Image: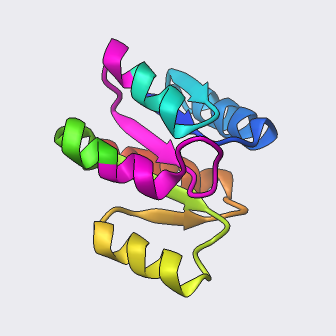
Amino acid sequence: MDVLIVDDNTEVSSAYGQVLERAGYMVKAVDNGLAALAELQQGRYSVILLDILMPFLEGKSFFRQLEADFPEMAKRVVFVTGMAGDDETRKFLEQTGQPFLEKPVEADDLVGAVRKTMG
């Protein structure tokens, strides 16, 4: 698979999925970090689009777990959040060194971030 979308808002993940599929990517969507960790046990992804606020295992904790368990995958995360204006969230995002997009995301920006992260 190319892209794993981790977002609890099914409308958002569906919209992202449609955009990315039209751009030629294979997409899988899950609604929380625990489901994403289970998915990563089955295979690897070129990019993980990761929301911050989710139930069960939110984006920050998921990312930390990813760094510990799948360090190569942590380098393939693109955060997509509506929380980038929050000081604590902004600091976390900047400390990760990973790209992030602020919701709402334009289709071209989404595809561009995925392409850039794939290298």
Magenta range is 40-64
All told, the count of numbered labels is 0
Quadrant for the C terminus, please.
top left
| Residue ID at (61%, 62%) | 81
68 or 94, nearer to the observer: 68
Measuring from the top left, give residue 22's x and y in whole percent: 63, 29
Which image quadrant for residue 102?
Answer: bottom right
| Residue ID at (75%, 42%) | 9
| Residue ID at (59%, 41%) | 56
Is residue 58 magenta-colored?
A: yes
Is residue 15 among what the camera can see?
yes
Is residue 53 magenta-colored?
A: yes
Q: Residue furthest bottom?
A: 87
User: In the image, is 96 to the left or to the right of 104?
Assistant: left
Measuring from the top left, give residue 108's x and y in whole percent: 60, 53
117 or 86, nearer to the observer: 86
Measuring from the top left, give residue 82's x and y in whole percent: 67, 67
Q: Residue furthest top?
A: 42
Query: Compared to 96, does 87 lie above or below?
Result: below
